[in-house]
Amino acid sequence: MNNLYIETRDPLFGIIVFFALIFVITFFSYWWGRYKAKDDSKYLDNFMKDLSTISSDGDIKNIICGANVSNRSWLILAQSYIQQGEYDKAIEIYQSILEVEKNTQQQQNIAILLGTAYFKAGFLERSKAIFLKVLKHAPRTPNALYALLLVYDRLKEYKKALDVLEPLQELDEAISHEKRYLECAYLLQQHLSQEEKTQKLLTIYTQSNSLAYLVFEYLFQTDAALAWSHLKPADFARVSDILWHLPHEKLDMETLSAHTYLRELFTAKGTFELANSSTIFELDILIKLQHSRQQGACLQFEYLCQQCKHIFPFSFQRCPNCHCIDSVMPEMLLTKDSFEENYTF
Ligand SMILES: [Zn+2]
């Protein structure tokens, strides 16, 4: 009878215990995995069930307060509403989470998200009030400071935007580009003489080699001769739409004749005959049409942000998508003549 039992000091006993342990651990891991999968599935079902009960003017707040769904899930949902342009729903979610959230840091983060949603929805004053409130409690919050700067910029309150740069600088944020742009924008807003404005703008342009679109949009309106004398050839393409729309009396024949790009641009427009072809496809087509005395096509412009690559039908100083400054680049677009007639009424 004793032979049926294995003594505890027998090596075989150790092997059996070892495999028994492996079996128990494997079984437990399998059971735990099944349990978690079932739990996650139940959680997802509840979340989807809650979502399906949101009506078009749904009361998201009641669902958030009553449902067993984490704030993180609601934040992901709010973000997807933002991406779809449904800002009202995202705002309602952020507001409701703020009412139930106890953690101060989280409250601050969600308040910034709420302010940003208001900003995107166009409620600039509400957005400003939220960021100011966040900064009152946490003045050294770069996200909130930068968001407030964008609000002031959109509101054209450039002096206040410049004031926001000071705390950002103290936080070692790179502000030189923003500062240059805001100084130019503020300069144009001030009641100074035209001469003073143009001189200061030209100083910023020549020293920084930036902000060509902003500077020459103003300069070609006020003093075309001065603009021609300072515009660098490297920036011709950057302001091509401004040049294209210049009236005949603002053209400078000497500068036009001296540069291939300008000769091609104004030959394509039909103002002069200074080029036979162009390496730029759109200009080449228009030049050939001009030479054959044919009509039927004209040039329109759309505006590319060189930073985020989004294209807009209008020019901008700050990209509406990524908020980058000085990233605008006019892109030529060949269209039918009839389109221009309709478009330009
Ligand atoms: Zn952009």
Image (cartoon, rainbow, N blue to C red):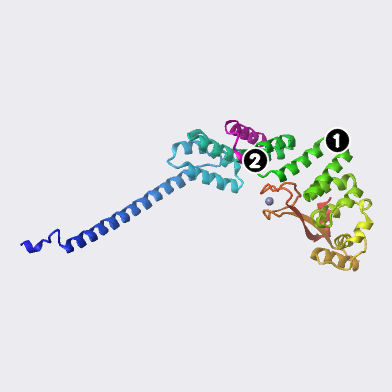
- Residue at position x 74%, y 49% from top? 326
Please state, as top left, top right, bottom left or bottom right, where the N terminus lies in the image: bottom left
Would you call the spot at circle 2 few (<14 residues within 10 Å), some (14-19), or many (20 or more)? some
Q: How many marks?
A: 2
Position of residue 298 measured from the top left corner of the image (x, y, whole percent): 83, 60
Q: Which residue is mark 2?
A: 146
Instruction: Measuring from the top left, give residue 149's x and y in whole percent.
Output: 68, 39
- The region drawn magenta spans 116-142
Kind of element beneath mark 2: helix
Seen in the picture, residue 267 relative to 214 is either above or below; the reply is: below
**Left-right relation of 338 to 161:** right
Residue 248 or residue 238, whichever sits in front: 238
Tell me: residue 324, above or below residue 196: below
Query: Hey, what amino acid is under mark 1?
Result: Leu
Of the numbered discs in the image, which one, if any, rests on residue 192?
1
Q: Give the distance between the C-alpha atoms of the residues marked 1 and 2, in whole angstroms.
A: 28 Å
Q: Quadrant of residue 178?
A: top right
| Residue at point 80%, 65% (across, down) | 280
Q: Circle 1 — which element? A: loop
> Can the viewer see residue 96?
no
**Whole-percent x, y for residue 57 in the image:** 56, 39
Res. 288 image quadrant:
bottom right
Residue 122 part of the magenta-drawn span: yes
Q: Main secondary structure of the magenta part?
A: helix
10 Å neighbourhood of mark 1: few (<14), some, or many (≥20)? few
Q: Is residue 137 visible?
A: yes
Q: Amino acid at mark 2?
A: Tyr
